[in-house]
Protein backbone atom coordinates (compact mmCIF):
# COMPACT_ATOMS: atom_id res chain seq x y z
CA UNK A 1 0.00 0.00 0.00
CA UNK A 2 1.09 3.56 -0.68
CA UNK A 3 -0.46 7.02 -0.85
CA UNK A 4 -1.25 9.34 -3.70
CA UNK A 5 -1.50 13.06 -3.13
CA UNK A 6 -3.59 15.13 -5.54
CA UNK A 7 -1.64 18.28 -6.18
CA UNK A 8 -4.67 20.48 -6.90
CA UNK A 9 -6.51 19.76 -3.64
CA UNK A 10 -3.81 18.32 -1.37
CA UNK A 11 -6.06 15.33 -0.80
CA UNK A 12 -4.16 12.17 0.18
CA UNK A 13 -5.62 8.85 -0.93
CA UNK A 14 -4.44 5.41 0.17
CA UNK A 15 -3.95 2.94 -2.68
CA UNK A 16 -4.33 -0.60 -1.36
CA UNK A 17 -2.61 -3.60 -2.92
CA UNK A 18 -4.74 -4.93 -5.72
CA UNK A 19 -6.30 -1.60 -6.69
CA UNK A 20 -5.06 0.79 -9.33
CA UNK A 21 -4.25 4.45 -8.77
CA UNK A 22 -6.74 5.15 -11.56
CA UNK A 23 -9.65 3.50 -9.77
CA UNK A 24 -8.84 5.07 -6.40
CA UNK A 25 -8.51 8.55 -7.85
CA UNK A 26 -11.67 8.17 -9.92
CA UNK A 27 -13.61 7.06 -6.88
CA UNK A 28 -12.48 10.27 -5.19
CA UNK A 29 -14.23 12.21 -7.95
CA UNK A 30 -11.38 13.09 -10.28
CA UNK A 31 -12.27 12.73 -13.95
CA UNK A 32 -9.59 10.85 -15.82
CA UNK A 33 -9.65 9.58 -19.35
CA UNK A 34 -8.61 6.00 -19.85
CA UNK A 35 -8.90 3.40 -22.52
CA UNK A 36 -7.01 0.10 -22.27
CA UNK A 37 -6.47 0.11 -18.49
CA UNK A 38 -3.67 -2.37 -19.17
CA UNK A 39 -0.74 -0.01 -19.56
CA UNK A 40 -0.54 -0.17 -23.33
CA UNK A 41 -2.36 2.85 -24.83
CA UNK A 42 -0.95 5.85 -22.96
CA UNK A 43 -4.32 7.58 -22.43
CA UNK A 44 -4.03 7.77 -18.64
CA UNK A 45 -0.52 9.24 -18.64
CA UNK A 46 -0.14 11.48 -15.59
CA UNK A 47 2.61 13.87 -14.54
CA UNK A 48 4.46 12.96 -11.34
CA UNK A 49 5.63 15.88 -9.18
CA UNK A 50 7.14 13.89 -6.33
CA UNK A 51 7.88 10.29 -5.49
CA UNK A 52 9.24 7.38 -7.48
CA UNK A 53 6.85 5.50 -9.76
CA UNK A 54 7.15 1.76 -10.19
CA UNK A 55 6.45 1.53 -13.90
CA UNK A 56 4.39 -1.43 -15.08
CA UNK A 57 3.26 -0.08 -18.45
CA UNK A 58 4.39 -0.89 -21.96
CA UNK A 59 4.30 2.72 -23.20
CA UNK A 60 7.25 4.64 -21.75
CA UNK A 61 10.80 4.36 -23.02
CA UNK A 62 13.66 3.37 -20.73
CA UNK A 63 14.74 6.98 -20.57
CA UNK A 64 11.27 8.17 -19.61
CA UNK A 65 11.13 5.49 -16.93
CA UNK A 66 14.40 6.69 -15.53
CA UNK A 67 13.24 10.31 -15.41
CA UNK A 68 10.09 9.20 -13.63
CA UNK A 69 8.23 12.45 -14.27
CA UNK A 70 5.26 10.77 -15.90
CA UNK A 71 3.42 7.48 -15.39
CA UNK A 72 0.46 5.34 -16.51
CA UNK A 73 -1.78 5.30 -13.49
CA UNK A 74 -3.91 2.37 -14.68
CA UNK A 75 -1.13 -0.11 -13.93
CA UNK A 76 1.95 1.56 -12.47
CA UNK A 77 2.53 1.90 -8.75
CA UNK A 78 4.90 3.53 -6.28
CA UNK A 79 8.31 2.51 -5.00
CA UNK A 80 8.21 4.57 -1.85
CA UNK A 81 5.37 5.67 0.38
CA UNK A 82 3.84 8.50 -1.61
CA UNK A 83 3.40 9.97 -5.06
CA UNK A 84 2.33 13.55 -5.68
CA UNK A 85 0.47 13.64 -8.99
CA UNK A 86 -0.65 16.48 -11.26
CA UNK A 87 -4.32 15.76 -10.62
FE1 LIG B 1 -4.18 2.75 -21.37
FE2 LIG B 1 -3.56 3.53 -18.91
S1 LIG B 1 -5.51 3.50 -19.88
S2 LIG B 1 -2.19 3.03 -20.52
Image: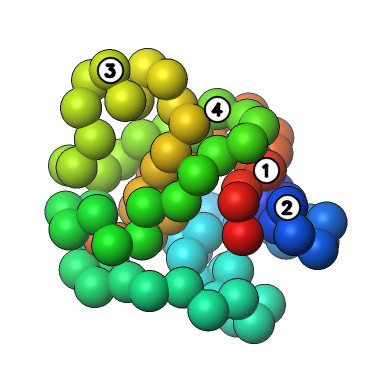
Q: Give the label on residue 40, or none.
A: none
Mark 2 burial class by Cα count in 10 Å: few <14, some 14-19, many 20+: some
Q: CA distance from mark 2 to mark 1?
A: 6 Å
The answer to whether the residue labelled 1 contacts the one labelled 3, judged by CB atoms less than 8 Å apart, is no
Q: Which mark sits nearer the N-terminus, 2 or 1?
A: 2
Number of marks drawn: 4
Q: CA distance from mark 3 to mark 2?
A: 25 Å
**Nearer-the-camera pick, 16 or 4:** 4
For residue 1, above or below residue 53: below
Q: CA distance from mark 1 to mark 3?
A: 20 Å
| Displayed quadrant of residue 14 | bottom right
Q: In this image, 83 relative to 42: left or right? A: right
For residue 78, above or below residue 30: above
Q: Give the label on residue 52, or none.
A: 4
- In the rendered image, which residue does mark 1 sit on? 84
Q: Residue at x 28, y 62 (%)?
A: 43
**Res 18 seen here:** no
- Where disc 3 sits, the SS reads helix
Q: In this image, 18 relative to 81: left or right? A: left
Q: Give the label on residue 7, or none.
A: 2
- Where disc 1 sits, the SS reads strand
**Nearer-the-camera pick, 6 or 75:** 6
Q: CA distance from mark 4 to mark 1?
A: 9 Å
Mark 3 burial class by Cα count in 10 Å: few <14, some 14-19, many 20+: few
Q: Nearer the viewer, mark 2 or mark 1?
A: 2
Q: Give the label on residue 63, or none.
A: 3
Q: In this image, 73 relative to 28: left or right? A: left
Residue 12 locus on image (x, y percent):
78, 57
Quadrant position of ligand 1: bottom left
Amino acid sequence: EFEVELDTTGEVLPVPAGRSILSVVREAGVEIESSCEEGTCGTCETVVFEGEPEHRDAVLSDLEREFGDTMMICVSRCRGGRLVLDL
